[in-house]
Amino acid sequence: MSAVPAPRGEQAQQRYEPAQGLRAHSAALLRHAERLRAGAVALDWKGPQAEAFRWRIEALADRCATAAAGLARSADQLDATVRTR
């Protein structure tokens, strides 16, 4: 780590990195949710246990999507906070 401060342009870029990271995690969670849903639909298994399993997979996919939305909102709030400084 250097004691010399980064030029202004680099400082601004460093401030946006956390928001970009949150958006990357959000996108990854959305991809996971899509894969979970696609896998549950493609499952060749019948019966009550299969339906219970699909329901649990759908619930997990919903949780991933909800977390992704929260991360995206946090990134937006972080960007808004950085811009007002």
Image (cartoon, rainbow, N blue to C red):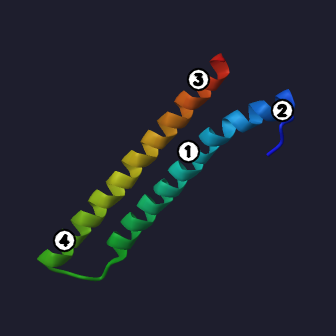
The mark that comes first in sequence, 1 or 2, is 2
Q: Is residue 70 above or below residue 62?
A: above
Q: How many marks?
A: 4
Answer with mark 2 or mark 3, whichever residue precedes in sequence. 2
Residue type highlighted by circle 2: Pro
Name the kind of residue labelled 3 in the image: Thr
Circles 1 and 4: CB atoms closer than 8 Å:
no
Of marks 1 and 4, the one in the foreground: 1
Q: In the image, residue 60 lies at what x, y percent?
A: 31, 60
**Mark 4 and mark 2 residues within 8 Å of each other at the beta carbon:** no
Residue 53 picture location, percent across and down:
22, 72
Dot 1, how many residues are within 10 Å of its Cα: few (below 14), some (14-19), or many (20+)? many
Mark 2 or 3, which is nearer the eye? Answer: 2
How far apart marks 1 and 4 lie (CA) works out to: 33 Å
What's the residue at 30%, 82% (across, down)? 44
Callout 4: helix, strand or loop?
helix
Q: Which residue is mark 1?
A: 22
Residue type of the residue flagged with mark 4:
Glu
Q: Nearer the viewer, residue 18 or 4?
A: 4
- The residue beneath circle 4 is 51
Residue occupying the far top of the picture: 84
Q: Give the residue at mark 3.
A: 81
- Secondary structure under tag 1 reads helix
- Residue 69's place in the image compared with 40, above or below, is above
Q: Which residue is mark 2?
A: 5
* Residue 67 as seen in the image, left or right of residue 80: left
* Earlier-in-chain disc, 1 versus 3: 1
Instruction: Decide if residue 48 is on the left or right side of residue 36.
Output: left
Cα distance in 3D space between marks 4 and 3:
45 Å
Residue at 14 percent across and 79 percent down: it is 47
Residue visible at 19% across and 81% down?
46
